[in-house]
Image (tube, rainbow, N blue to C red):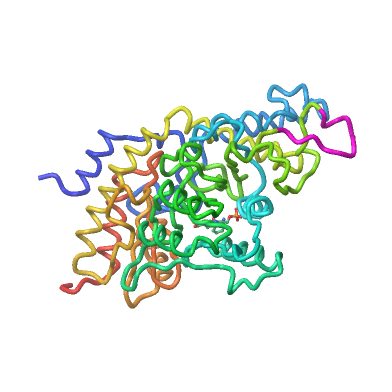
Amino acid sequence: MRTPEHQAHDRDAADPGHRHLFHVPPADGGRYPEVAYLAGNSLGLQPRATRGELLADLDAWARLGVEGHLDAARPWLPYHELLTGPAARLVGARPAEVVVMNSLTVDLHLLMVSFYRPAGRRTRIVIEDTAFPSDSYAVRSQARFHGLDPDATVVRLTPRPGEDTLRTADVCDFLAAEGDTVALVLLGGVNYLTGELLDIPAITAAGRAAGAVVGWDLAHAAGNVPLALHDWDVDFAAWCSYKYLNAGPGALAGVFVHERHLGDPHLPRFEGWWSTEAATRFEMTPVSRPPATVEAWQISNPPILAMGPVRTSLEIFDAVGMPVLRERSLRLTGWLEHLLDEVTADRPLTVVTPRDPARRGCQLSVRIAGASAAELAKRLRYEHGVIADAREPDVVRFAPVPLYSTYHDCWRVADALAATVEGATS
Ligand SMILES: Cc1ncc(COP(=O)(O)O)c(C=O)c1O
Ligand SMILES: Nc1ccccc1C(=O)C[C@H](N)C(=O)O
C-alpha cells in the first residue's frame, strides 16, 4: 500500500518541474535535507545561474571601468533592453509597452502621476480593502498630493458579509453604478492575502466603460498566472521581481503602459535623462525628446548589477514558458488543496482562497480560528522545516511554486498541520 508520502514522491517523479535550477535552503536537521519552501509568494528562491551571471557583470566593471557602458559583453547603456522582450512575453505585452525599473511602489507612484488625474466629480480611487498596505498608503498619499481627503477619495471594496473574496460581478456592478465618480481603479491582480485572482479583463472593461483609468498591481500575478495585458486593454500595470520572478530581495520592478498612451504629449510624466531618446541622451540639451515607448517613464540610469538577476530569472520563464508553468501550477496547487481538505476537515482551519482554479494562482491561504497565525507558522518552521508565511491575525499562506516546489513539499505542509493543529477528535 502506497502511503500518501509515497504518492507524493510518485507524483514528483512523474511531474518534476525545474527545481534543479534553484538553490533550495537546507533544513539544518530534521527528517529531510531541505526545507519545504512555500514562501515563494513573498521571496522567490535563488536561481543557480544568478551568481555566475552577476559575477560576469562585476568582472566587466573590474576590467573595463567606464568603458563597460559600451564595451562590456552586455553593454550597460542598452542593458535594460535585454529584459524588455522576456518581460513583455511574461505579461502579454508588446515590447514598447514594458520596461524594468525602480521598485514597485515607486513605479505605482510614477504611473499615478500620469494616470491619476482627478477632475470635477471624478476623483475617487478604487482599491481592495485587503490591498497590500503599501498600495493603500500610496493611493492615500496621491489623494493628499492632489489636495483631496484620502478617506473620501479612496474606495475600499469589501467582500460580501460572510465571504472572504471579491466577486467580479460585484466589482463590475459598483463600477457601473458609481463609475462616474471614479478616476482610477487600482487593484491587485492576485490578492496578496487571499490569493484570489481577479477577472482582470472583465474588471478592466467595466472600469474603462465607466470612464475610469484601470491599473493593476501584479506583484502576486507576474510569473504566477498567464497575463495578456495588451489584449485585455489594461491602461497600466506594475509588478515586483522578487516573488515569483526569483530576482532577489528588493529586485527591480516591471512596468506596463498600454500602447494607446505611448507618445501622448498631454500625459504628465516625471522625467530625467533616461526619459529621453537614447540617441539624444548625450547631447546634453535642456529639453528632452521622449520616445514613444514606455521608456519615456524611465528617469535615472538603471542599476546594472540589479538588472542581472532579473535578466537571469526572465530567461528561465522564457525557456519554460508560462503555459507550461500554469499547467504544473494547477496540478500542484490542486494536490495541496486535496491534502488540505483532508487535514482541515476536523480542525479549526479554513482555506479562504477561491476553490475555482481559474480564480487563483498557486497560493492557498488558510485561516486558523482562535489562534495566532504567526505562532502556527513558527511551529511549522521550527518543528517541521516548513517555511510558510503568516499574516496576522489569522492567515497562513502556502505557495507551491510551479518552477521549484514539489508534491512532497505539499505533503509536508499537510503532515505538519496535522501534527501541529489539534483536531476536534484528537
Ligand atoms: C501587492 C503588493 N504591492 C506592493 C508591494 C510592495 O512592493 P515594494 O516594496 O517593491 O514597493 C508588495 C510586496 O512587497 C505587494 O505584495
Ligand atoms: N519585500 C519584503 C520584505 C520583507 C518582508 C516581506 C516582504 C514582501 O515582499 C512581502 C510581500 N509583499 C508579501 O506579500 O509577502
Q: Quadrant of the C terminus?
A: bottom left
Residue 45, position in %: x, y?
49, 44
Answer left or right for 62 relative to 255: right
Question: Residue 230 or 24: which is nearer the viewer?
Answer: 230
Across and down, in percent, residue 268 comes to: 72, 49
Q: Say left or right for 108 vs 40.
A: right
Q: Is residue 406 left or right of residue 58?
A: left
Which residue, as the protein is rendered here, is positioned at the far left? Answer: 1
> For the magenta stretch, what is the residue range?
280-291
| Residue 43 image position (x, y, % from top left) | 51, 50
* Closer to us: 374 or 9: 374
Identify which residue is drawn at 89% across, 34% down: 284
Residue at image position (39%, 66%) is: 395
Residue in the foreground of this view, choosing between 216 and 3 = 216
Is residue 289 a member of the stretch shown in magenta? yes
| Residue 91 visible here | yes
State whether residue 35 appears in this view.
no
